[in-house]
């Protein structure tokens, strides 16, 4: 039963991170999104583990990692959507549309619900978020690859 409780805790921490990442301002640095999401992720993961009479200490690293990663990815996706929506680089701090925020929040609700019903689904979501984060980082590095000036 411990595996199911851990998976459920990860799922709820991911959902908390997705919601926090969707609502923080896009100009907030990555560490700020992690700092905002980590406490909620730890509390959500800890609540599930405590409810299943399991040790609560795994909630700290699991909740921190899951919520932090989800917040970073959601913040990056919503900031990218805001930049594309505005169509100009001068509006870097612009908030994404409420539609993008609603889609991310609905995804978070789906992750939370599925992780409570089918706990291992949270591991699939975690792997998908890691893949998305790495893919976006590689794309950002390639985007500016030709702009380096040699002196």
Image (tube, rainbow, N blue to C red):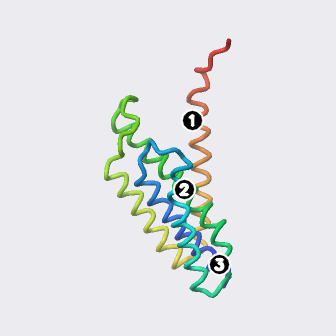
Give the percent coordinates (x, y) of residue 3: 67, 78
Residue at the spot of label 2:
35
Give the percent coordinates (x, y) of residue 65: 62, 60
Q: Residue at x 39, y 37 (%)?
A: 84
Instruction: Tell whether 92 sits left or right of 123.
Output: left
Question: Is residue 79 depicted above or below 60 in this figure?
Answer: above
Question: Is label 3 in a helix, a strand or a loop?
Answer: loop
First in residue order: circle 1 vs circle 2: 2
Residue at the spot of label 3:
56
Question: Is label 1 in a helix, a strand or a loop?
Answer: helix
Q: Residue at x 66, y 84 (%)?
A: 54
Q: Residue at x 55, y 55 (%)?
A: 34
Looking at the rendering, in which quadrant would you find the C terminus? top right
Question: Is residue 56 depicted above or below 138 in this figure?
Answer: below
- Hey, which quadrant is residue 144 in on the image? top right
Question: Is label 2 in a helix, a strand or a loop?
Answer: helix
Give the Cα separation between the discs numbered 1 and 2: 23 Å
Mark 1 burial class by Cα count in 10 Å: few <14, some 14-19, many 20+: few
Numbered mark located on residue 26 in the image: none
First in residue order: circle 3 vs circle 2: 2
- 5 or 94: nearer the viewer: 94
- Hey, which quadrant is residue 69 in on the image? bottom right
Residue at the spot of label 1:
140
Give the Cα separation between the discs numbered 3 and 1: 38 Å
Instruction: Tell whether 14 sits left or right of 104.
Output: right
Q: Residue furthest left?
A: 98
First in residue order: circle 3 vs circle 1: 3
Tell which tag, 1 or 2, sits nearer the viewer: 2
- Callouts 1 and 2 close, C-beta under 8 Å: no
């Amino acid at each position: 039963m411990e595996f199911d409780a851990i998976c459920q805790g990860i799922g709820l921490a991911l959902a908390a991170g997705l919601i926090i990442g969707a609502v923080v301002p896009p100009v907030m640095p990555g560490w700020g999104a992690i700092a905002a999401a980590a406490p909620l992720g730890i509390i959500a993961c800890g609540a599930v583990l405590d409810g299943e009479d399991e040790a609560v200490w795994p909630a700290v690293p699991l909740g921190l990692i899951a919520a932090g990663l989800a917040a970073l990815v959601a913040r990056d996706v919503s900031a990218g959507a805001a930049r594309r929506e505005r169509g100009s680089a001068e509006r870097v701090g612009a908030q994404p549309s409420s539609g993008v925020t609603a889609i991310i929040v609905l995804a978070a609700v789906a992750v939370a619900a599925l992780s409570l019903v089918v706990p291992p689904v949270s591991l699939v979501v975690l792997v998908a978020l890691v893949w998305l984060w790495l893919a976006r980082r590689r794309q950002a590095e390639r985007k500016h690859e030709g702009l380096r000036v040699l002196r």
